Amino acid sequence: MISDVLRQSAEKYRHRPCLKASSGKDLSSLSYGELDVLVDRLSAYILARGMGPLQRICIISENRPEWVIGYMSVLRAGCTVVPLDCLSKPEDIRHLVRLSKAGMLFCSGKFSEQVQGLCGRDGVGSGPVCFDKVEGFTPLSGVLAAGERLIKEGAPCERRTSDDDPAVLIFTSGTTGASKGVVLSHRNISFDVSAVLGSIPLCQDDRALSVLPLHHTLESTAGLLAPLSRGASITYARSLRSKEILSDLLECRATVFISVPLMYEKMAAGIRREIAKSQIHKRLSVRLLLWLSATAKDKLNVNAGALLLRSIRRRAGLNHMRVAVSGAAPLRGEVQKFFSVLGVEILEGYGLTEAAPVVSVSELGRLRHGSVGRPIPGVDVRILNPDAQGIGEILVKGQNVMSGYLESPGSTEDVLCDGWLHTGDLGRLDEDGYLYVCGRSKNVIVTQAGKKIFPEEVEAVLAGSPVLREAMVTGKRNPISGREEVHAIIYPDYEWLQNYAEERSLRLGEEEIRNIIRAEIRRLCVRLPDYKRVRDFTIRQEEFPKTSTKKIKRQAI
């Protein structure tokens, strides 16, 4: 059982710090022993409420220790946990609660209005338990007190399940269509945690800063269960604001950080801005040190940045950083190289919810830029129907692969065949077994000449511009030639454009903005083969809709 991870760590690291949150919370700091006791109490309460084996219990909350208590308690009680996306609309939350047929629901005060009344007809057997004190809700503090009394009276606080029983039901974010319920067993998740630790060595002295939402499989597996199994401490970031993340990195002296490419891009941009604003002699000095560090890395494979750029690393909260991981979307090579020069190697990984989720990850000292590393131990990857460049659909096999989608045998059969998970992603393997992900098969643009264009590759090039804040590339038929061409949908950085205009005393209209963007796209696309270059574009007035891990919802555009 997954909850055994906590039980075993509590025995070994009872007094060591486990979970930390910003001040002002009831449970701002917990040791391993304290967390284990609270999980027992809530588990006893769940069992006393008559929750049957594998009955589903929903959780919707921001990241905080109480989320972890709820998650581990549901599993210890032998039930199935249903983590809900905290960015979901109220109507979506109601729909997913009904779909999951939940017998109980945990929430934080922040989401109390959204779940108000989700009882009886909506499938929740009892009133929601709230992590905060909110009128009309059962407070977690009262539930924990009740659980303590139950245990003293001899009530059970644990129910064993088999490794192949469902542990978690996760609804995918639906970036390419409607959400599906992914059923992951205790074996799926436990295996993935163990395999991840085989590639990313963590220890009891590590301190992780958690920024990704806990309902996301990457964070719950690699950002929660993996550190818990090694006795490391986890601090929950106050928000996703860059300044607060920087402050949290500094305060907790983070050695482990798991995030998405957008976060690393913002951090790199912030560091570059600080360098650009410094006095000219300091700026020149830093640029010289950056050059020396890059040269030492390229020519001698020496991590000189940790010493030469120590002051920059310290101000950026990276002075103690030992393991940085990027997942959920492609990481731009230039961002990875920038952090490498600073002495921080970002390990890029690949996975999907259906694989619990990690499939492959880079290893320290064995990075290959552009690659997401080799498959984690015990996981097999093969390429289906590779083309002349070796690119085909990525198939995955291992004990981390899901049993199927909730009440959807047809969808399950579409992706699972003889134990192989058909990911829908395109990629290739090199001669040493390193995996390179090219993009989604549904997104590929095919020209009349049969050339394949991966939108993600073009988007990575466009992302290097300060003018283009966000870009999504798609295929569009030319109305004159009838040929499929590369088209970009652009959300400009309007603040950059405004500063540009003020510096040059210009008055920007729609046509002037289009001309600036057109020139920028042409400049960037020079590095691409002619058939991959953007031929036309449209401009958006607002950001793209995104998932909780900051991936653009292509289907919604």
Image (cartoon, rainbow, N blue to C red):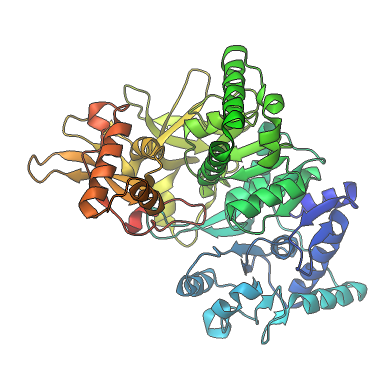
- Viewer-closest of 87 and 301: 301
Using the rendered view, name the quadrant where residue 106 is placed.
bottom right
- Can you tell which quarter of the image residue 174 is in? bottom left
Q: Write the residue at 28% across / 44% down.
A: 517
Instruction: Quarter of the image for the C terminus: give it.
Output: bottom left
Seen at 44% across and 52% down, the residue is 412
In the picture as drawn, the residue positioned furthest to the left comes out as 480
Q: Is residue 259 left or right of residue 404?
A: right
Q: Residue furthest bottom?
A: 136
| x and y percentages locating residue 223 in the rendered image | 67, 48
Q: Residue at x 78, y 74 (%)?
A: 45
Q: Is residue 361 visible?
A: no
Residue 65 to residue 469: above or below: below
Is residue 484 placed above or below 54 in the rendered structure? above
Q: Is residue 557 visible?
A: yes
Asked if residue 225 lies left or right of residue 283, the reply is: right
Q: Is residue 472 above or below residue 372?
A: below
Pick the front one: 169 or 440:
440
x and y percentages locating residue 87 in the rendered image? 52, 64
Could you say where residue 367 lies in the image, as x and y percent from the top left? 58, 25
Which residue is at the far front? 505
498 displayed left or right of 160:
left
Counting from the top left corner in percent of width and height, residue 145 is at: 84, 76
Total number of numbered discs in the rendering: 0
